[in-house]
Image (cartoon, helix red, strand yellow):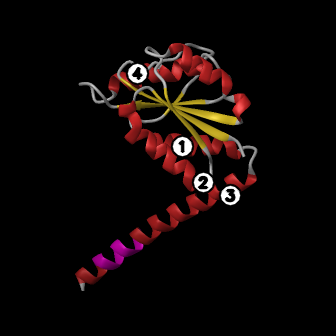
Amino acid sequence: MKKVAIVMGSASDKPVAMDAVNTLAQYGVQAIVRVLSAHRTPQEARDFTLSLEGEGVGAVIALAGMAAHLAGAVAANTVLPVIGVPVASGGLGGLDALLSTVQMPSGIPVATVAVGGAKNAAILAVQVLAVSDEKLRQKLLDQRAAMRAAVLKADQDINEALKAQEA
């Protein structure tokens, strides 16, 4: 099974990054996790990115706040799918990071999730891997079925409670 690389621009991004780590673990996907900055450690970030295919990585999740150039820097150095997670920091609540992550030049895409959306980034990475891994695909289908069942149960519960209240 392919791995997913998770790279964060700062140790302060760790709480958000752990959402991705934990979600990947629920699907049995191994993560390689690093703290590397597009600005403070550009050579190390580049070297890490260039090593990913040789390490069996199938997708990359890059988390950063403020200027949030990390996902773009990673995407510029690989053809692996890169998923950017803007992280709220500074005074703009993550809007600056969102715009920095999503505004990529033509030909160097970064799939971008919501500010702090590391769980969805991990699920998207699993979906990328599931294209060629039937076991992962089935785990995704099972999770969708469980979510559906939970919503239908909540719907049933609320309607039963309202009917009991009317009686």
Task: Report the Cα–Cα distance between label 1 and label 4.
Answer: 20 Å
**Residue, disc 3:** 138
Callout 1 secondary element: helix
Q: Is residue 32 magenta?
A: no
The tag earlier along the polypeptide, 1 or 4, is 4
Q: Are marks 3 and 1 in contact (CB under 8 Å)?
A: no
Residue at image point 63% right, 34% down? 59
Q: CA distance from mark 1 to mark 2?
A: 10 Å
Q: Which residues are magenta?
A: 155-162
Give the CA distance from mark 4 to mark 2.
30 Å
Q: Which mark is residue 122?
A: 1
Above or below, 158 against 31 in this view is: below
Read off the residue under disc 4.
99
Q: In the rendered image, which residue does mark 2 sit on? A: 27
Q: Nearer the viewer, residue 129 or 144?
A: 129
The residue located at (42%, 19%) in the rendering is 100
Q: In the shown orientation, is residue 137 left or right of residue 76?
A: right
Instruction: State the image coordinates of residue 125 (x, y, percent, origin top left).
Output: 60, 40
Question: Distance from label 3 to label 1 (Cα)?
Answer: 16 Å
Left or right: 100 in relation to 2: left
**Mark 3 closeness class: few <14, some 14–19, many ≥20 residues within 10 Å:** few
Q: Nearer the viewer, mark 4 or mark 2?
A: 2
Q: Residues within 10 Å of mark 4 (few under 14, many from 20)?
A: some
- Give the residue type at disc 3: Gln
Which of the two labelled residues, at mark 1 and mark 2, occupies the earlier sequence position?
Answer: 2
- Residue at 71% from the left image edge and 29% from the top image edge: 53
